[in-house]
Amino acid sequence: MRAIKIMLFIVISSVMSSVYAQSYQDVKKAMTKASQVAVAGFRESRVSGMIEKIAECYAQLSKKMFYCSYIDIASRYIELTVSQVMGYSPSQFFTDDSFSDRMSEIFERANMDIDQANEYLSLISPEINELVDIELSK
């Protein structure tokens, strides 16, 4: 079911801009790699490691647009999960406002309106969260 939803999003995205159109396999591969990068950053230096990985990606945003969102979503999921389990507040970097500011830049560049952006996040976030869980279990 999720694969069908992601495929639907890809079709919608391709209509919006053929520049960003990718196959489901390409998107899944990029999300898997981004999850691995986020987990590696967490294992190396916890929150600061993930923030560093995100910053490196955003420095090349024009080349890695949606890939940066995958790393950001994966890292945010890790931080929110860990902070909840450990009983502390998440890093300011991963709060809703900070996260939304970073995502807005991507959505604006992709010419996505708020409804498309929310649909995008609702489709890919569960997929990325699952990939992060798999990677963390290794």
Image (cartoon, rainbow, N blue to C red):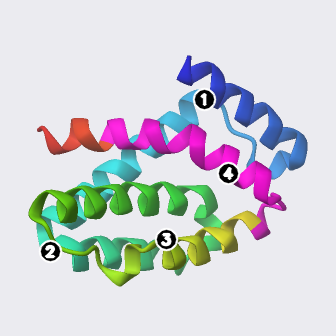
Q: Nearer the viewer, residue 12 or 85?
A: 85
Label 4 amino acid? Asn
Say whether residue 118 is magenta: yes
Percent x, y of residue 119: 69, 44
The residue that mark 2 highlights is 45
Upstream in the sequence, badge 3 or badge 2? 2
Percent x, y of residue 62: 67, 71
The residue that mark 3 highlights is 96
Q: Main secondary structure of the magenta part?
A: helix
Alpha carbon distance from label 3 to label 2: 22 Å
**Of marks 4 and 2, the one in the foreground:** 4
Upstream in the sequence, badge 4 or badge 3? 3
Q: Which residues are magenta?
A: 108-131
Label 3 amino acid? Asp
Upstream in the sequence, badge 1 or badge 2? 1
Q: Which mark is residue 118?
A: 4
The quarter of the rendered structure image containing the C terminus is top left
Alpha carbon distance from label 4 to label 2: 30 Å
Instruction: Answer few, some or many: residues within 10 Å of disc 1's Cα (few below 14, many 20 plus, some between 14 and 19).
Output: some
The answer to whether the residues at label 4 and label 1 have Cβ atoms under 8 Å apart is no
The secondary structure type at the circle numbered 2 is: helix
Label 1 amino acid? Tyr
**Of marks 4 and 1, the one in the foreground:** 4
**Of marks 1 and 3, the one in the foreground:** 3
Instruction: Answer few, some or many: residues within 10 Å of disc 4's Cα (few below 14, many 20 plus, some between 14 and 19).
Output: few
Total marks shown come to: 4
The quarter of the rendered structure image containing the N terminus is top right
The residue that mark 1 highlights is 24
